[in-house]
Amino acid sequence: MYTKKIYFSGGDFHELQEVFRSLPGVTDTCTGYINGEGETDFESVSSGTARAYMGVEVAFNPKKTDLSQLMDVLFAVVNPYVPDGQGEARGEQYRAGVFYASGEDEPQVQLHLNFIASRGKPSAVSEGGLTLNDPNSNPKLARQCHALALPLRNFQRAEEEHQHYFEKHPEEKSFIDFPKLREYLKF
């Protein structure tokens, strides 16, 4: 079976793995460190002493799901307008991002992120000669997209204790309501 891989970051990588592991068309997931510089491990990346993004590798069958659907799921659980993580996972290492291993995926990733960025900008609506949501009149209305869209330089698999974490630790608290997410995604 032909599969492709894409890499996502944003918040806690344990939660991201749980989100993607049972989606239709996803064949495998793996937590790890994306675009790291030097030796990376959980302690060094989560503390910010090693530069890398905590994320998940998603292998998928493009005949059963497509990259756009996977990015829709990512941005249903990760806020691209937050600059430094999600929930209690804060810092550059938890920033939302899409990292593509194949150059053929770049246009689709860039298009998706451009769409998300355009949703954050206020639109000018004319009503009775007045312009509402004019960015010049109130720049605070504009939201900036902080999600990254970058080529994958490297991926280092996280330690075994961080693979399928919620299966091993079902008592752990999550900021994602998984039953509600599955209902929303209808699977």
Image (cartoon, grey):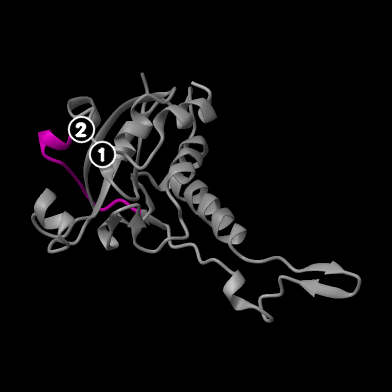
Name the element at disc 1: helix
For image coordinates 10% across by 57% down, the residue present is 44
Kindly report the distance in space between the C-alpha atoms of the residues bearing marks 1 and 2: 6 Å
In the image, farthest residue toward the right? 128
Residue 20 left/right relative to 123: left
Amino acid type at circle 2 is Tyr
Q: Is residue 5 above or below residue 168?
A: below
Considering only order in the chain, which callout, 2 or 1, is on the residue closer to the N terminus?
A: 1
Q: Is residue 19 above or below residue 156?
A: above
* Front residue of this view, candidates 115 and 22: 22
For image coordinates 46% across by 37% down, the residue present is 70
Residue 160 within the segment the image draws in magenta: yes
Local crowd size for mark 1, using a 10 Å CA cut-off: few (<14), some (14–19), many (≥20): many
Residue segment shown in magenta: 151-163
Quadrant of res 146:
bottom left
Disc number for residue 165: 2
Residue 170 left/right relative to 26: left
Name the element at disc 2: helix
| Residue placed under numbered mark 1 in the picture | 14
Q: Is residue 145 above or below residue 112?
A: below
Amino acid type at circle 1 is His
For image coordinates 51% across by 26% down, the residue present is 183
* In contact (CB < 8 Å): disc 1 and disc 2: yes
Residue 105 left/right relative to 52: right
Q: Residue 27's spot in the image, x, y percent?
A: 34, 23
* Front residue of this view, candidates 115 and 110: 115
Residue 4 in sight = no
For image coordinates 38% across by 53% down, the residue present is 97
Quarter of the figure that contains the N terminus: top left
